[in-house]
Image (spheres, rainbow, N blue to C red):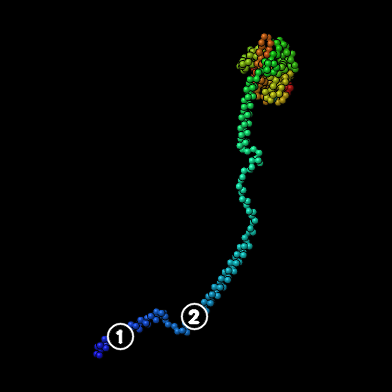
Amino acid sequence: MSTGTILAIAIPVIVVLGAVVAFVSLSRRDATGLGHLSRETRRRDELAAAAAGEAAAGDDAGAFGVSSQARELERSVALERRPAPVAVDEPELPQDWAPPPPNEVGVTRRQFLNRSSVILMATGLGTFNAAMIAFLWPRPTRGFGSKVKIGTIASVDEAIASSTPAANFSYFSEAQSYIQPYPTDSATQSNAEATYGGVVLEGIRLGYVALWQKCPHLGCKVPVCGSSQWFECPCHGSKYNRVGEKKSGPAPRGMDRFPVTIEEGNVYVDTGSVSQGPAIGTDTTGQGLEGPHCA
Ligand code: FES
């Protein structure tokens, strides 16, 4: 075998062996790190690491114990400071409403409304019927409420002149009225013409005025006062002049009056037709106070 042939075979073999050795060396170095420690060294390192781990575990256990004790202390202090719980009654739950049985209810709403309607209708009809009956009821033909004949002109004038306790104040009980002479002088008559009207004025023109005894304030019978020559109500002190015009007191107007007529020489007072007295301030006769009051 020639030298060239030997070299041709040896060189590739050497190159291949070198490559294998280099590969194996690099592989072991990757597996064991940069350095390669001996077994004793690794054993010593492992013991040191175990001792260091136990020391660290001991420290953690101590720190954990301290922090848990602190938390326990904080918790106990917070519990002591917490106010004592207040006892609260359990709220009662609302009960479902159920209508009471009909036998326990005196009157149901329907019954109440029905009865109210019937009562109202009955009251209205009753009032209407009463008004109709009163309207159609015949007026009395005698006594108060009718046209009352109180006497002849002469007898009436005589009664007026001789009346007591004061002249010119004549009371006729059948008419519940005072028949008062009304001044016939032109000035007074002219005042009356300007103040009164209708049937009352017709009686004034005849020289009479019929004054109802009932006080227009609250209905007391108004007597005559002989000293003052006025009508003076004893109930609340209203005062009227001789022809029933209000002078003072709480009455809302002068004395109410009835029409006076003369028929065939007789004087009549129509007590079924009352006229309201004159307004406050009316003074057609100018009669002043003639003496001390009685009321
Ligand atoms: S009732 Fe006559 S003043 Fe009152």
Find residue 72 and name its label. none
- Where is residue 242? Give x, y as percent: 69, 18
Answer with the quarter of the image where residue 235 lies. Answer: top right
Q: Amino acid at mark 2?
A: Glu
Q: Foreground mark, 1 or 2? A: 1
Q: Is 155 above or below relative to 30?
A: above
Depth check, front residue: 244 or 171: 171
Answer with the quarter of the image where residue 170 lies. Answer: top right
Image point (46%, 84%), residue name: 39
Depth check, front residue: 261 or 279: 261
Q: Which residue is mark 2?
A: 46
Total numbered labels: 2
On the picture, is 34 further left or further right than 238?
left
Q: Amino acid at mark 1?
A: Val
Q: CA separation, marks 1 and 2?
A: 44 Å
Q: Quadrant of the N terminus?
A: bottom left
Image point (61%, 34%), residue name: 114
**Which mark is first along the chain, 2 or 1?**
1
- Where is residue 249? Give x, y as percent: 68, 25
Image point (70%, 14%), residue name: 150
Mark 2 CB near ligand 1 (8 Å cut) = no
Q: Which residue is mark 1?
A: 13
The secondary structure type at the circle numbered 1 is: helix
